[in-house]
Image: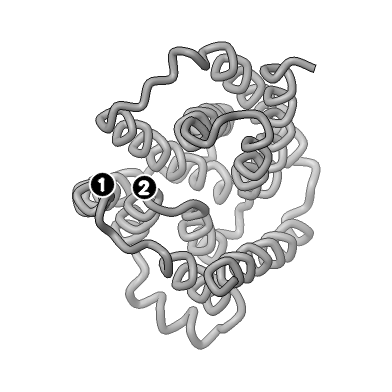
Amino acid sequence: MPIELSLGLIADVTSIVTAIIGFGGGMLLIAVMPLFLPAAVIIPIHGFTQLASNASRMVFDLKNVNRQLLWPFLMGSLAGIAVFGMLLLNILSDYIPLAIGIYLLLNTWSSRFAQLISRYENFYLVGFLQTGLGLVVGATGPLGLSILNKQSEDHNEVIATSSMFMTITHLSKLAVFGVMGFALWDYVPVLLTMTLCSIAGSFVGNHLRNRVKRELIKPVIKILLTGLALNMIAGVWL
């Protein structure tokens, strides 16, 4: 099977997963991509594909996007790009996933911690950390998702607004990589195929999501967030 078609099918499936649950598809995709592509182009191509996946998911469900959170997150993101962009080549990022993992575990399972941290949680800070840290480490999307999941009982709103956040994050990442000189002209067929398949996956996943009850999805999100957090912590120590 041609590489373009293989990656396109994988992008389609992972985009469906994210549209239903809210996250996870991007991590599955980047775990598979090294089997098909050189290491040097994985991050830019993954970012481009995830931009298409998240932007299309947001557009397909635009009515459920909490637009009041756009400007706080965007302002925080711009600050995050400025700070972490300057530190990109020098920052010691080895232990950042450990901090994110511990935060996710406490925020998901400790009501006392969640109540305490809620005094400081705001979407300016979420934008700053999610987008800024997204330049140097992966899997920052759950930072915003964990807060949205606490503040809203509407699963469609959570997914659509998280898609808006991730669209900003991936767009910022691609802009930084562009400035750094990444060129992907040799991979246009792969990019085009993965982009179209990601958009198709978003469309299918958005329709399937409405058939799943919120009370069934929320525990799944908590379990997956926990698994992700434990994986991040283990990755640092191992």
Q: In which quarter of the image is residue 191?
A: top right
- Residue highlighted by disc 2: 135
Question: Looking at the image, do the residues carrying marks 2 and 1 touch, with CB atoms under 8 Å apart?
Answer: yes
Q: Where is residue 162 in the image (x, y as percent from the top left)?
A: 50, 47
User: With 171 as the anchor, is 141 left or right in this view?
Assistant: right
Earlier in the chain: of badge 2 and badge 1, it is 1
Which quarter of the rendering shows the N terminus? top right
User: With 176 as the anchor, is 161 left or right in this view?
Assistant: right
Along the viewing direction, whichever of 126 and 153 lies nearer the viewer: 126
In percent of the image, x 77 and y 36: which residue is there? 208
Q: Specify few, some or many for label 1: CA neighbours under 10 Å numbering under 14, 14-19, or 20 or more.
A: many
Q: Position of residue 157 (x, y in %)?
A: 55, 47
Question: Is disc 1 placed on a helix, strand or loop?
Answer: helix
Along the viewing direction, whichever of 45 and 201 lies nearer the viewer: 45
Q: Distance between the residues labelled 2 and 1?
A: 8 Å
Position above or below: 35 against 200: below
Along the viewing direction, whichever of 180 and 17 lies nearer the viewer: 180
Along the viewing direction, whichever of 35 and 131 lies nearer the viewer: 35
Q: Where is residue 86 in the image (x, y as percent from the top left)?
A: 19, 49
Q: Could you say which disc has been placed on residue 138 in the image?
A: none
User: Which residue type carries mark 1?
Assistant: Ile
User: Which residue type carries mark 2?
Assistant: Leu
Q: Nearer the viewer, mark 2 or mark 1?
A: 2
Which quarter of the rendering shows the C terminus? bottom right
Q: In this view of the protein, can residue 58 be seen by the observer?
A: no
Position above or below: 185 against 120: above
User: With 151 as the anchor, is 129 left or right in this view?
Assistant: left
Question: Is disc 2 placed on a helix, strand or loop?
Answer: loop
Q: Specify few, some or many for label 2: CA neighbours under 10 Å numbering under 14, 14-19, or 20 or more.
A: many
In percent of the image, x 68 and y 49: which residue is there? 21
Q: In this view of the protein, can residue 157 be seen by the observer?
A: yes
- Residue highlighted by disc 1: 81
